[in-house]
Image: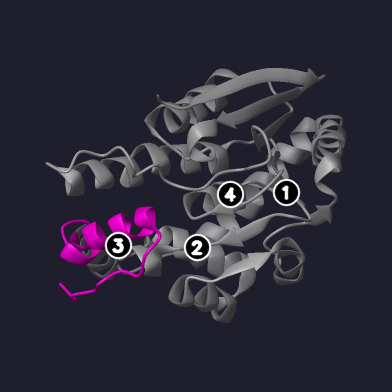
Amino acid sequence: MPGMLSVDRPAEGVVRLTLSNPEKRNALDHAILDGISAAVAQHDDARCILLTGAGSMFSAGYDLSDLPEDGFAAAAEELVAHPFADALDALEGTDVPTVAALPGHAIGGGLELALVCDFRVAADTAKLGMPPAKLGLVYSHTGLRRFIDAIGINRTRELFLLGRYIDATTGLDWGLVNRVIPAEDVETTALSLATKLAGNAPLSLRGNKRVLRELLKAERELDPAIEQELIDLRHSCFDSEDFAEGVKAFAEKRPARWQGR
């Protein structure tokens, strides 16, 4: 069964988007990612957007479990490169403040989805991690840049080259999250923060978000030839034997047998 995105308005000016894919720990599939892009566009009257996960999980990242063996590489790239990128762009590009409430673990693409939000409130039981090195996946240069902007190059290396998972308290120290609180208080604390943001001057919020976005964008400029090389490098990983093996090994909870091809 595909996941779903629930949309409601829990407080004046606040639109809440809830990732719901319980059988797969709120993994991100086409339905959820397309839903995020559509909901952000449709609710342009919101004063704040609150993104959270159903149950005790934020998101386990990309849902690669049901992709067909025949055409696996193309299907994986289609999910990771397109609807995921669109959802990130929608959240990052909106003029209203965004809050991610993490009632539990945020892994892989789930962690980047939270990272594009302006604020992150995490349960003290949450784990934060990036498994591309365990999957044989070359991450997007735009995604890596987001992490470098947030936590610096050395900690980005720890996450992506080691495939390290950290606890929420370490995430707070690193700057991956803004607040760490008991799991049972995440919903109310995040909603309180969203309500306060929704009550602030909209022209100020939109203007300051625009300035911050443009300042960060100016620091991300790459030579077009180099950028294309990085894009090609990422595309090549989807066709590799190691990526197919990495995803299979990850699902089977066993060490991968890497071939370097």
Q: Quadrant of residue 178?
A: bottom right
Q: Quadrant of residue 25?
A: top right
Indicate the amino acid at tag 3: Gly
The residue tagged 4 is: 116
From mark 2 to mark 1, how far is it between C-alphas?
Answer: 19 Å
Looking at the picture, does residue 67 appear above or below residue 236?
Answer: above
From mark 4 to mark 3, how far is it between C-alphas?
Answer: 26 Å
The residue tagged 1 is: 119
Q: Is residue 225 left or right of residue 204?
A: left
Q: Residues within 10 Å of mark 3 (few under 14, many from 20)?
A: many
From mark 4 to mark 2, how far is it between C-alphas?
Answer: 15 Å
Q: Earlier in the sequence, mark 4 or mark 2?
A: 4
Q: Residues within 10 Å of mark 4 (few under 14, many from 20)?
A: many
The residue tagged 3 is: 246
For the point 60% across and 75% down, the residue is: 152
For the point 77% across and 65% down, the residue is: 169
What secondary structure is marked by label 4?
A: loop
Q: Position of residue 104 (x, y in %)?
A: 68, 47
Label at residue 130: 2
Q: Is residue 151 left or right of residue 42?
A: right
**Magenta stretch in the rendered image:** 236-261
Nearest to viewer (mark 3 / mark 1): 3
Nearest to viewer (mark 3 / mark 2): 3
